[in-house]
Amino acid sequence: MSPTPEPTKEPNILGKVASIVGLLGAALFFTGWIYRWSYFYFFQLEITTLDLPPQSFLVVPLQVFFGSFASVDSFWQLGKTVLVAIVTFILIQLTLWLLQFLSILIAKILRWLQFLIALVLAGLIWLTIRLIEYFNKQLGKYQKKSSSKLVSPTQKPRLLKIIIWLQLLADFIINKLSAIKFNPINFRQSFLDEIIIVIGILIALFLLARDRGTIDARRDAGPNSTLPVVTLVTPENRLPLGRKLENEFINPSLKGYRIIGDRGLFRNILGQEQTDTTNPKKPIVWRLLMERGGWIYLFPALPENAKAEDRPVIIAIQESTLGEQLLILSPDVSKKR
C-alpha cells in the first residue's frame, strides 16, 4: 500500500482577512476617539460625558486623513498624512535597528562579564589551592626542624581532599558559566518587533488625530466655522438668559435665580445674547456645537483676532420635552431685508 499523502496546509484567507479588518477597525476607532477627544477638549468638554455613538468614531478618521474635503485643505492634509506615514516607517525601522544593535552590544558585554567572572573565580580558587599547598609545605619544613607534629598524619589526606574539592568546584563553576549562552535577540523573528510597530503606528495616529481635532475645533470656534448659526426661542421662565422678543433692550429678570461660581461669566453674557454682525471688529455670532443627551450646547464664536489660547464660553441648555422650544439652524447669519 502506498503511503497516504500528508494534507497540504492551505492558507486561511478568511482568518487573515478577519484579522486585518479587526486591526483596521481598532485603528480607525482609536483615531476617531482621539480626534473627538481633542476636538471637544478645545471647547472644554469631556468626551466621556457626551455619550457619543460608537459608530461615529469610525467615520471621523476620513477627515483626519483627508481633511475637511475642501480642495486646498484636503491636499494639505493628505500630504501631511503621507509624510507622517513615511516618517513613522523610517522611525520604526531605525528603532528596530537600534534595538538590534543594543541587543548585540549587550550580548557581547555579558559574554565578556561571563568570561571575567569565570576567570576571577578560577583565579581565586587556584590561589587558594596554592596557598594551602604553600602553607602545608612550610608547615612540613617547620615540623622537621622543630621535631613537633602540628599536623597529624591523618590531617594530610584531609588537606588533599580540600584541594581536590576546590579543583572540582572550579571546574563546576567554569562549566556552568560556559553553558550559559548570551545571544542577541532577533527582533525580526520575535514578537517584540510587532509590538514596536503597533506602538509606532498608534503614536502616529494619535498625533495626526490630536492635531486635526485641534485645528478643526479652532476653525469651528472662529469666524470660518462650519457649525450652524443657531437661534433658540424658549419660554421666559425656562432660561435666565436671553432677550424678550417684544423688547430686546430689557435685561432678563433674575428674580428667583441663584448662582454658584463666577458671577462675572454670567455678567459677560448679558447683553451679548443676540447675534449681531453690525460691528465687523467685534461680531457676535451664536453657533450650535451639538445636541446630545437632552442638552443643547451653544457658544458665541471667537473673533477673527482671537489669540491661540482663547476659548469660547459654552452654554448648556436642557432640551424641553413639552415642545415649547424652537431651535432654528442656518449655515450663515440672516441678511437684513
Image (tube, rainbow, N blue to C red):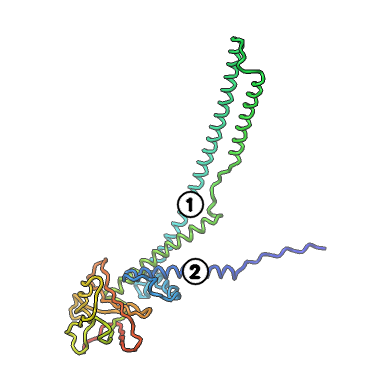
* Residue 41 against residue 139 in the figure, above or below: below
Q: Which residue corresponds to mark 1?
A: 97
Quadrant housing residue 313? bottom left
Query: What amino acid is found at the position of numbered circle 2 in the picture?
Result: Leu
* Residue 198 against residue 237 in the figure, above or below: above
Left/right of residue 328 with respect to residue 104 in the rendered view: left
Q: Which residue corresponds to mark 2?
A: 24
So how many labels did they put on this image? 2
Query: What amino acid is found at the position of numbered circle 1 in the picture?
Result: Trp
Quadrant housing residue 207? bottom left
Quarter of the picture holding the N terminus: bottom right
Residue appearing at x 62%, y 35% in the figure: 172
Quadrant housing residue 126? top right
Q: Residues within 10 Å of mark 2 (few under 14, many from 20)?
A: few
Whether residue 272 is visible: yes
Whether residue 276 is visible: no
Residue 178 placed where, x, y %?
59, 39
* Front position in the image: 268 or 116: 268
Residue 112 placed where, x, y %?
52, 38
* Residue 40 against residue 278 in the figure, above or below: above
Distance (Cα) linking label 2 and label 1: 26 Å
Residue appearing at x 54%, y 38% in the figure: 114
Instruction: Determine whether the residue tagged by mark 2 lies in a helix, strand or loop.
Output: helix
Residue extending farthest to the right is: 1
Left/right of residue 87 with respect to residue 114 in the rendered view: left
